[in-house]
Amino acid sequence: MTLQNFLASLAVPTEAFRSGAGALFVAAALGLTGCAGGAPADPGTTSPAATGGATSTPSATPTPTPSAIYKPADASGPAQNVPVPVLPEVAKTETKEGLEAFTRYWFELLNYAYQTGDVASVQAVTSTSCEFCSNITNSLTTNYQGDRWLSGGKITIPAASTSFERGADGNYQMILQVLQDTITYYERGGSEFRPATKPSNTGNVLLVGFEHSAWRVNGLHPLR
């Protein structure tokens, strides 16, 4: 689907959606490029040492505290030191900019869950009524059971748009083009426990509500 088609698809009626089989993320293993992570620890400084109460020695040159280095997953093991996404301040506002920022943040949480198997953060900002979202998190949990992990599957969103009009159901719509790289499924020893998932290019509608002064994803549907 082209960018023009995505932009022309704004305000898709909710009843036109069909969730479920095989449209968005095959095997529900997600990722999104560009996770926002916390800054490295502030380097400490050495206080001057007083001599005789009159003079002091120059402070030592601060040495930056080394931060843990991110390592993506591969056949040798799962991803390491994955940056934890941080909710931008603008994403706390019920504005068009806030909705767009929250959408990016939500996909970053999916990426974090995809790389770590930890789905708690994305579940915290997703309604349990989103069936497709539950399929995603359940599949991630299953694929990380035991000594298993996933590699690849990076998600990018080359096209995203919204009319920022609240629907009758109380939700705003985000129209998205979602690209996903190949996903490889590993188990202990580096062998693949299932065939790799091929890359995909799909159109989707994200339904987002602003509830109790915060955004929450209430639905995720493929465009048919």
Image: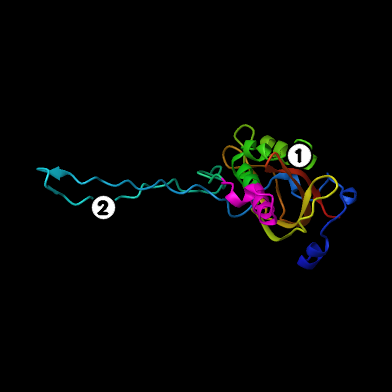
Q: Percent x, y for residue 201?
A: 75, 58
In the drawing, does residue 54 fall left or right of residue 44? left
Magenta stretch encompasses residue 134: no
Magenta stretch, overall SS: helix
Closer to viewer: mark 2 or mark 1:
2
SS assignment at label 1 = helix
State the residue at coordinates (15%, 44%).
Answer: 50
49 or 71, nearer to the observer: 49
Answer yes or no: is residue 1 visible.
no
Mark drawn on residue 135: 1
State the residue at coordinates (11%, 47%).
Answer: 54
Callout 1, which amino acid? Asn
- Figure quadrant of the C terminus: bottom right
Answer yes or no: is residue 116 visible.
yes
Q: Which residues are magenta?
A: 85-107
Callout 2–callout 1 Cβ contact below 8 Å: no
165 or 204, nearer to the observer: 165
Q: How many neighbours does mark 2 have within 10 angstroms: few (below 14), some (14-19), or many (20 or more)?
A: few
Figure label count: 2
Q: How many neighbours does mark 1 have within 10 angstroms: few (below 14), some (14-19), or many (20 or more)?
A: some
Q: Which residue is mark 2?
A: 61
In the drawing, does residue 181 fall left or right of residue 38? right
Q: Percent x, y for residue 127?
A: 74, 38
Q: Percent x, y for residue 71?
A: 51, 48
